[in-house]
Amino acid sequence: MTCRTPHLSAALVVLAAAMAPAIAQAPRGKPAASLPPPALTYRGLIPGRSTVEEVRKALGTPIEEHRWYAYKLLYDAPGRPGHLDAVHLRSSDGKRGELGCIEAASIPAGFESLEQVVVGLVNDELGYMLPGYDFNEGEYEESMSVGPAIGPMVRDLAIRMAEAERDASRQRGR
């Protein structure tokens, strides 16, 4: 479709920009209120549960904030000079709503290696690590997942870790 007038083109751009915050970046869905908190939170905050007010109280004043695809707050990443953590809110004005998701460059203590991540998240997060054949876009678990490739990656790492432990155990037994 070709727009013949600059006014119609501009109107379409404005309409698309106005709709984008509602449909992009911060995943939809919420964890059930009856579920316990996840094994890993972002400075005590939980996506889908923590309010904008709680986010601002816990994190303080961001170095920058703006409305983009979602309302975004940028903070220095602790322990990673020059890196930023991006906090996405499900909010049109940055005042009301809830925490949507976090793109964190910071690395929480105890999660410095892939092995520590797998072991640390095993009880709570494996349900979001779905194999490709069971990945149904739009479902809650999928909205919280990093994608269909994570299931095989975690499985392969778990096998390598188990084999390494078996080999180390055999060495100790000699």
Image (cartoon, rainbow, N blue to C red):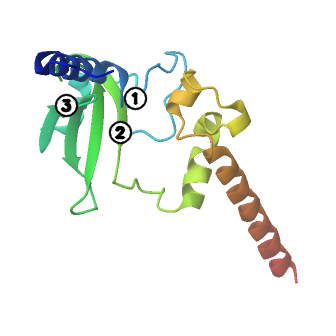
**SS under mark 1:** loop
Q: Residues within 10 Å of mark 2 (few under 14, many from 20)?
A: many
The CA span between labels 1 and 3 is 15 Å
Q: Position of residue 22 (x, y in %)?
A: 31, 18
Q: Which residue is label 2 attached to?
A: 102
The CA span between labels 2 and 1 is 8 Å
Circle 3: residue type: Lys
Left or right: residue 166 versus residue 148 is: right
Q: Residue at (54%, 36%) from the top-left corner?
A: 145
Q: Quadrant of residue 9?
A: top left
Could you tell me how many numbered marks the image carries? 3
Disc with the residue nearer the chain's start (2 vs 1) = 1
The CA span between labels 2 and 3 is 16 Å
Q: Position of residue 78 (x, y in %)?
A: 26, 55
Q: Is residue 131 visible?
A: no
- Which of discs 2 and 3 lies nearer the camera? The answer is 2
Q: Residue at (61%, 46%) from the top-left corner?
A: 150
**SS under mark 2:** strand
Circle 1: residue type: Pro
Q: Which residue is label 3 attached to?
A: 57
Q: Residue at (50%, 34%) from the top-left corner?
A: 38
What's the mark number on residue 47?
A: 1
The reply to whether discs 2 and 1 touch (Cβ–Cβ < 8 Å) is: yes
Of residues 11 and 50, the one drawn nearer to the viewer in this rendering: 11
What's the mark number on residue 131?
A: none
Q: Residues within 10 Å of mark 3 (few under 14, many from 20)?
A: few
Q: Residues within 10 Å of mark 1 (few under 14, many from 20)?
A: many
